[in-house]
Amino acid sequence: MFSSKIDLFREEWLDLIFDQKNKSYGAYALRKQNSSNTTKSLLYAGTVFIFLFLTPKIISLINGPSSADEIMDGTTVTQIAPPPPVNPDTPPPPPVEPPPPKQAQVKFPPPIVRADHLVSAEEPPQIIDLKEANPGQKTIAGDPEAEIVIAGPSGNGPKQAAIVEDTEVYNMIHIENQPSFPGGMDKFYAYLQKSVKYPPMAAERNTQGKVFLSFVVEKNGELTDIKVDRALGDGTDEEAIRVLKASPRWTPGIQNGRPVRVKYNIPISFTLAQ
């Protein structure tokens, strides 16, 4: 009855599937018309696709060739605007100075020691011949009637750059030559021992310890910007600042061969005698 190839949409199979069933139901009609519906759909979709693909070409044929097509065909001629008119008030460029005329030179090569039979018979130039001529490697005939042009250097010449003062405060760790007290640090501690006066309040309260200070050694050795980094209290901080302000001038720090400003840190001890 049926061939070896099974096609569920053939009428024989449809009748077998819908045997003793309601064939008026929509599924039977859809399966029966499936092949024709599929073919129609493909035809409609192909027609719409071809129409949409050819629409731009049809529009271009109706409207005629575009400007881009004309440029590709080489038929468009580009108009170049003429140059602007020359302003008569514009000054002409400066004239180019002619090169200086050649000056007469008398051959005066360096002396070369040779054997007698190789010495040229040509007489060497005399001193009187060199008074009015520039000695050169060969004799060049100058033009005595040429105009003398003295070519000098143009411009204002080299100018010395303004010296910018170095006001940066350097760290004493990264300095070439650190600042120092005259005579060394031993002299500085001897100065502190001699100059520090124990504050009465600190002595009364038995306040002992160290006051940590920082200051800047200026280029002239003066101590400025004195600050207390770690205080001890009871008048010891003020006494430490007073002693540093009264300190003799230090030897300034050196960087690149010049004195510079350097920040320095130092502790000052306050200890009561037992």
Image (tube, grey):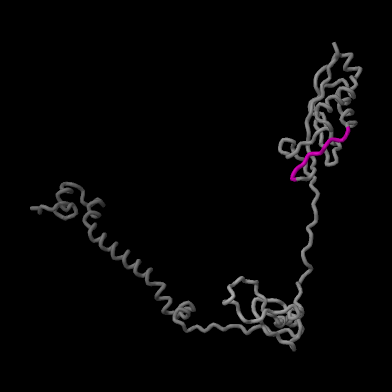
Please name whichever residue, 249 or 135, is drawn nearer the observer in this view of the structure. 135
Query: Do we see residue 170 in this rendering?
Result: yes
Side of 187 relative to 56 (left or right): right
For this view, does 122 lie left or right of residue 77?
right
Horizontal and vertical percent position of residue 265: 78, 31
Q: Quadrant of residue 184?
A: top right
Mark count: 0
At x 79%, y 47%, the residue is 166
**Who's the residue at 87% across and 14% down the image?**
205
User: 76 above or below 20?
Assistant: below
Q: Position of residue 44 (x, y in %)?
A: 31, 65
Q: Which residues are magenta?
A: 248-256
Task: Say which of 261 and 147 sits in front.
Answer: 147
Q: Is residue 98 visible?
A: no
Q: Is residue 82 left or right of residue 61?
A: right
Is 73 placed above or below 175 here? below
Is most of the magenta stretch helix, strand or loop? loop
Seen from the viewer's position, the closer of residues 120 and 254 is: 120
Residue farthest front in this picture: 116
Residue lying at the far bottom of the rendered structure: 145
Spot occupied by residue 254 in the image (x, y as percentages of width and height):
77, 41
Q: Is residue 198 magenta?
A: no
Viewport quadrant of the C terminus: top right
Looking at the picture, how far across and down is residue 162, in whole percent?
A: 80, 56
Residue 100, picture quadrant: bottom right
